[in-house]
Each structure stands twice: as C-alpha cells, then as structure tokens.
Image (spheres, helix red, strand yellow):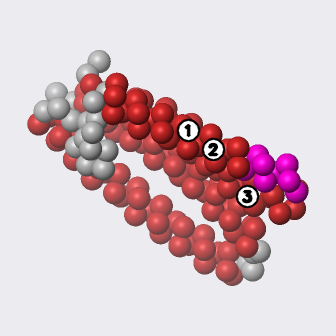
Amino acid sequence: MSRSKKIILFTFWMNNIEIPLFAIFIFGLIFSKNKGLMAAMLALLLAVLLIVVIQFELWYLRDRLNVYKVRSIFCFTDDEREKEIAMKVHSEMMISFINGFFGSVIMMVGAWLFNLSAISIITCFTVLWVIYGVGINIQYLYLWNKFDNVK
C-alpha cells in the first residue's frame, strides 16, 4: 500500500471518529441547559476527548506518516500521478461542497418559514452536517479509489 493510500485511509477513519464526537459534543451543549450538570460534564469530557483525538491524528500524521504541511492539498502526494488524482478528487469534491452550502441555505429558509426554535434549528443543522460530513468522507475515499484504479 502506498504512503498516500495509508494517509487517506487513516484520515478517513479518524474523520469517522471525530465527526460523531463533535456532534455528540454539540448535542451535549444544547441539552445541558435543560438536563443540568451531568450533560454539561459530558460535553466537557467529549470536548477534551475530541482534542485528544485530533492531537493524536496530527501526531500520527507528522511522526508516523511524515506529513508536515497539513494545510496543503498535496501534503500526502509523492509523485505527479498522485497529484493528478488529488486534483481530480478535489475538483469533484468542490461540487459536493457547493451543493452542501446551497442545501444549508435552503434548510435555513425552511426553518425561517416554519418558525422553528433556535434549539430545533441547531439540532437540525447538527444532524444535517453529521450526515453531510460522513457522506463527504465516504465520497472522498470512493473517488480516490476510483481515480487511483484508472490506468
């Protein structure tokens, strides 16, 4: 397995851990007002756990997989073929990001038309963004495998 494939699989699984943790953290914040100290402590515990998971991911990428520039889109590519695959995948992903943005705008207009409360809007957006985040993550892995296998 190539280094870039290891990096993509590692970040795929880490994102699948981080996205639900973040959603549970948001729900803990939302419902801590109504449920008291226990929900607030759970939200704080999840925030600390999320920070530890993110720090582990950055450490593993830096020390085990030798990725030093995490902000670059080519941080995990080693040759021109992988850069070309990364560009194809990122151009396809931009379409999904634009669709997600417009979907969020439509949802916001719907929330405004139905006079939803702030808690309901935040809950709907959190559920939408968890589904969207996991879907984007799966789509990224699928597209990478699809373009990587094209000869």
Residues at circles 2 and 3 in contact by the CB criterion of under 8 Å:
no
Secondary structure of the residue carrying numbered label 3:
helix
Secondary structure of the residue carrying numbered label 1:
helix
Left-right relation of 70 to 138: left
Residue 48, label in figure: 2
Judge depth for marks 2 and 3 and give the one in front. Answer: 2
Q: Residue at x 76, y 46 (%)?
A: 42
Residues at circles 1 and 2 in contact by the CB criterion of under 8 Å:
yes
Nearer-the-camera pick, 28 or 99:
28
Q: Residue at x 77, y 74 (%)?
A: 117
Distance of mark 3 from mark 1, alpha carbons?
Answer: 19 Å
> What amino acid is labelled 2 in the image?
Val
Q: Is residue 15 visible?
A: no
Residue 31, quarter of the rendered image: bottom right
> What amino acid is labelled 1 in the image?
Val
Determine which residue is flagged by label 3: 29
Secondary structure of the residue carrying numbered label 2:
helix
> What amino acid is labelled 3 in the image?
Leu
Q: Residues within 10 Å of mark 3 (few under 14, many from 20)?
A: some
Residue range in magenta is 36-43
- Find residue 83 and report its horizontal and vertical position in percent: 17, 40
- Find residue 100 and report its horizontal and vertical position in percent: 48, 61
